Every structure is written in structure tokens, then in C-alpha cells.
Image (tube, rainbow, N blue to C red):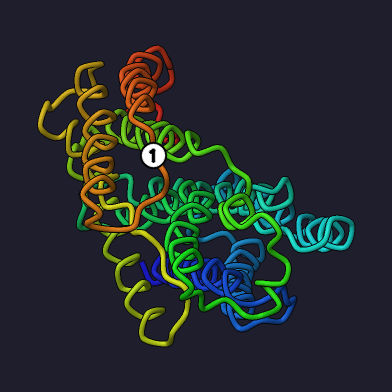
């Protein structure tokens, strides 16, 4: 198990580096060799070493899992020069939603999926539970899915500070902002944040339940993600770095399936609607500074929540997990 624990450390370093990088760029200009980039790269290098060991002599993975991880690494490396070129061509891009950033996300998703699949097959004789490394790999995949939303989560607090004259962004950043609200929020439509959240968390939750036949694992993965985000928020606040809204209501989506004990459209509606309405209540009460929301967005949140379990139920390869273990 040491091999897969080292993968957890590798992905955790990437998690730390990426969260730090999101905070960093709300305060300072783009730098290739910033400390957050170095931390992220340290995780990348550790993973590359683990992958190299498996290529030299296969011990802990099947070839398909190893090849998936390799594809993820190759795609990530391709994304680096493309991202630098994008910055040169278009200047400082104040959004996590740029095309080249999505190459990073997709590449990392593939890496995590490959490692998780390898671990699932390696422990095929052990019943998956939330106490295992499955929770960590699920959490890392959730984090990668949710990372684009940090533009709105960091932006909410940074914009609030800006309009109240308390911005902690560097003068270089402030001089670049000609349209504060649009640029701080990355120019992303407000409705994207809640709808994207319901879609990605709902999909991951339902697929995990179908594969593992366990309703607790998605809840624990989301809880671990939120806990680590709170730890990061406290650390950034302590060193006077920009902080973000922690998406605590995401937890309501997997909890709804746990309460219903079935992946039904009703559980999907309760999860999607519950996530949005509690988030909206937090915003209206001004209890926390949240990303912008409008009440009508509750409708697509509920519809998408209902649609996900219905759509996933039609995926044939998820119906017999004991015979199709490779899907994890």
C-alpha cells in the first residue's frame, strides 16, 4: 500500500499548490517560478517517479491504468508551453476558465482516474469503504472538478474587499483591473457556478454509488474536500493572502443520496435544490461572502440534479460492477 500512499502525497502536493496558486494570483501577477507552482510541480515530479517505477517493472498496476496516467502526464506537459503561449498572446488571464487551464484540469483528471483505477484493481479482494484510500482519490477527483469554481469563490471575497476599499491585491494587479467585477470574477456568467457544481458533484456521486455500491464514500470524500479547503482558508488568512468561500453546501448533494439510499431522480432534486437554496440563504443573510446567485438558478439546479441519476442509470457498463471492475 506504500506505493498508493505515495500517490496520495503526490496529489496532495498538487492540491496544495493549485489552491495556493489560485490565492496567489488574486494578489500577485503571473510568475512561472512562484512558490505555489514549485509545490505543484513537486507533486507532479513525485507522481512521475512513481509512474517511471511502474514502467520499469510493473508491480502495482495493470497496463491500462499505467497508460492512462501516462496520457495524463503527456497532456499536462503539452499544456505547459500552450499556457505560456496563451499568456504571451493575451496577457495576464484573470480566470481559471481559460482553454489552456482546462488542458491542465483534464490531464490531472486522467492521472487521478488512472491511479484510482489501478488501486481499485490492486485491492479487488477488499470491500471498498470510506476508510480506505478510495476516499482520498475520490476527494482529489472532486477537487479537480471543482477547481474552476475557485475563480468565483476567491473572487467573491476579493471583490467584496475591493468595493469596500480593503483590497489586499498588489498595485500591479489593481492597475490592470479596468472592469473590476468582470475581471475579478473572470468574466464568467454568474449562473455557471451553481449549475456546474450540481452537475459535476452529482455525476461523481452517482457514478461512485453505482460502482462501489456504497452511499457513504461520496459523503466522506466531499467532507474531506471541504475540511481541507477550510484548513487552506485559515492558513491563507493567517499570512494575509486572499481567501475564498468554502463550498460547504456541496455536501448536501451526496448526503441526499445517502438519506434516500437510492440513486433516484427524487434524491437528485433534493440534493441539487438543497445545495442551491441553502447557499442562497447564506448569501441573503450575509452570513458569508458567497459567489453571486440569482433565485431562478434554483430551477436548472433542480432539473440537472434530477437528470443525472436517470442518465447514469442508462450506462450499461455501470450496471454490473463485480464483472466490470475497471470502470472505477
- Residue 109 against residue 131 in the figure, above or below: above
Residue 274 locus on image (x, y percent): 21, 33
Residue most toward the bottom? 239
Above or below, 6 against 304 in this view is below
Q: Quadrant of residue 235?
A: bottom left
Secondary structure of the residue carrying numbered label 1: loop
Residue at image coords 26%, 64%:
227
Q: Is residue 117 left or right of residue 48?
A: left
Q: Is residue 123 above or below residue 84?
A: above
- With respect to residue 224, does 243 lie above or below? below
Q: Quadrant of residue 153?
A: bottom left
In the picture, measured across the screen, residue 31 lies left or right of residue 131, that is right
Q: Does residue 69 show up? A: no
Give the residue pinned by disc 1.
293
Q: Quadrant of the N terminus?
A: bottom left
The residue nearer to you, when weighing 324 against 86, is: 86
Numbered marks: total = 1
Q: Nearer the viewer, residue 133 or 187?
A: 187
Give the residue displayed 62% in from the left and 80% down from the top.
170
**Left or right: 270, with 149 as reference point:** left
Residue 148 location, x and y as percent?
54, 50
Q: What residue is shown at x 61% (from left), y 58% (from top)?
A: 180
At horizontal 74% and vertical 76% (from top left) the residue drawn is 32
Q: Is residue 299 visible?
A: yes
x, y percent for residue 187: 63, 46
Q: Residue furthest left?
A: 259
Q: Position of residue 205 (x, y in %)?
A: 32, 36
Amino acid at each position: 500500500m506504500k506505493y498508493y500512499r505515495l500517490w496520495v502525497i503526490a496529489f496532495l502536493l498538487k492540491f496544495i499548490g493549485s489552491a495556493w496558486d489560485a490565492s496567489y494570483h488574486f494578489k500577485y501577477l503571473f510568475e512561472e517560478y512562484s512558490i505555489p507552482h514549485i509545490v505543484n510541480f513537486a507533486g507532479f515530479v513525485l507522481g512521475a517517479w512513481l509512474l517511471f517505477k511502474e514502467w520499469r517493472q510493473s508491480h502495482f498496476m495493470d497496463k491500462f491504468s499505467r497508460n492512462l496516467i501516462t496520457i495524463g502526464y503527456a497532456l499536462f506537459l503539452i499544456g505547459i508551453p500552450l499556457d505560456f503561449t496563451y499568456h504571451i498572446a493575451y496577457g495576464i488571464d484573470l480566470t481559471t476558465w481559460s482553454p489552456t487551464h482546462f488542458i491542465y484540469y483534464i490531464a490531472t483528471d486522467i492521472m487521478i482516474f488512472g491511479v484510482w483505477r489501478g488501486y481499485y484493481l490492486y485491492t479487488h479482494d477488499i470491500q471498498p469503504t470510506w476508510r480506505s484510500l478510495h476516499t482520498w482519490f475520490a476527494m482529489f477527483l472532486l477537487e479537480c472538478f471543482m477547481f474552476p469554481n475557485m475563480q468565483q469563490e476567491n473572487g467573491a471575497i476579493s471583490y467584496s474587499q475591493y468595493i469596500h476599499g480593503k483590497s489586499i491585491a498588489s498595485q500591479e494587479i489593481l492597475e490592470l483591473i479596468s472592469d473590476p467585477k468582470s475581471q475579478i470574477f473572470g468574466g464568467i456568467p454568474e449562473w455557471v457556478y451553481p449549475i456546474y457544481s450540481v452537475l459535476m458533484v452529482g455525476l461523481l456521486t452517482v457514478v461512485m454509488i453505482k460502482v462501489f455500491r456504497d452511499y457513504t464514500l461520496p459523503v466522506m470524500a466531499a467532507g474531506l474536500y471541504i475540511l481541507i479547503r477550510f484548513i487552506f482558508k485559515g492558513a491563507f488568512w493567517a499570512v494575509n493572502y486572499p481567501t475564498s468561500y468554502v463550498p460547504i453546501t456541496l455536501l448536501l448533494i451526496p448526503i441526499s443520496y445517502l438519506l434516500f439510499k437510492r440513486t433516484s431522480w427524487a434524491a437528485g432534486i433534493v440534493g441539487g435544490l438543497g445545495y442551491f437554496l441553502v447557499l442562497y440563504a447564506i448569501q441573503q443573510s450575509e452570513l458569508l461572502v458567497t459567489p453571486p446567485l440569482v433565485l431562478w438558478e434554483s430551477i436548472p439546479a433542480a432539473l440537472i440534479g434530477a437528470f443525472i441519476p436517470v442518465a447514469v442509470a442508462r450506462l450499461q457498463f455501470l450496471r454490473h460492477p463485480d464483472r466490470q471492475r475497471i470502470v472505477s
